[in-house]
Image: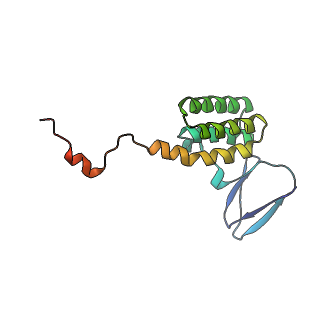
Amino acid sequence: MALKLTLKPGEKFVINGAVVQNGDRRVTLTIENKASILRSRDVLLPHEANTPVKRIYFAVMLLYLGEGSETDAYDEFVQRMAEFFDVLLNKEIMERCLEIVRDVNTKNYYRALMRCKKLMPYEKERLEYVPGELPEDASDNQPSAS
C-alpha cells in the first residue's frame, strides 16, 4: 500500500534517517514501499527530550529511524519506561504505556510514537501541577510568623 505525503513549501521530513526538504512549492510524494518517515513536527532533537515521556518518545524514534544501535535504543526505552511506570498511579495511563510497550516489542514503532505523543498532554498537566497551591489573594490572609 502506497503512502501519499503532501508537503508544504520548505517542509522538512526524514526518510530512513535522511533529512529531506521540500522546495518552494507544495508537492505530493508517493512512497511505494515500506520506509521510516517522520515529518519535522514529529522529530524530537536530543536536547528536547527533557521530560520522562519525551525521553521515551526519543528512544522509540531512534528505533523507528534505525539510528544508532538498536540494542542501545531499546535498552534506553526499557529504562525510561520503567522509570515512568514507577511513578504512575493512573490506570488508564498505565494501560496506554503497556500498549506502547506492546507496539515496541512487535516493532510497530510508528504506532508507539503516536501513542507517546498522546501521553504528552497528560505529562504536561502533571508536571505543571502544584499540590496545595494557594490562590494569589489567599496568601494575604495567612497569619504572619512574628
Residue at 64% x, 31% y: name it.
76
Residue 65, given in percent of the width and then of the height, sits at 73, 43
On screen, residue 115 above or below 104:
below
Q: As rendered, which of 99 and 63 lies closer to the eye?
A: 99
The answer to whether residue 85 is visible is: yes
Residue 117 position in % (x across, y down): 62, 48
Q: Eyeballing the image, is 90 above or below 138?
A: above
Q: At 59% from the left edge and 38% from the top edge, which residue is drawn?
A: 55
> Can you name the residue that lies furthest to the left here?
146
* Colour pattern of the rendering: rainbow
Residue that appears at 55% across and 42% down? 47
Q: Position of residue 137 (x, y in %)?
A: 25, 52
Which image quadrant: the C terminus? Answer: top left
Q: Is residue 8 above or below residue 86?
A: below
Numbered label tally: 0
Residue sitting at x 16%, y 39% = 144
Quadrant in the rendering for residue 74: top right
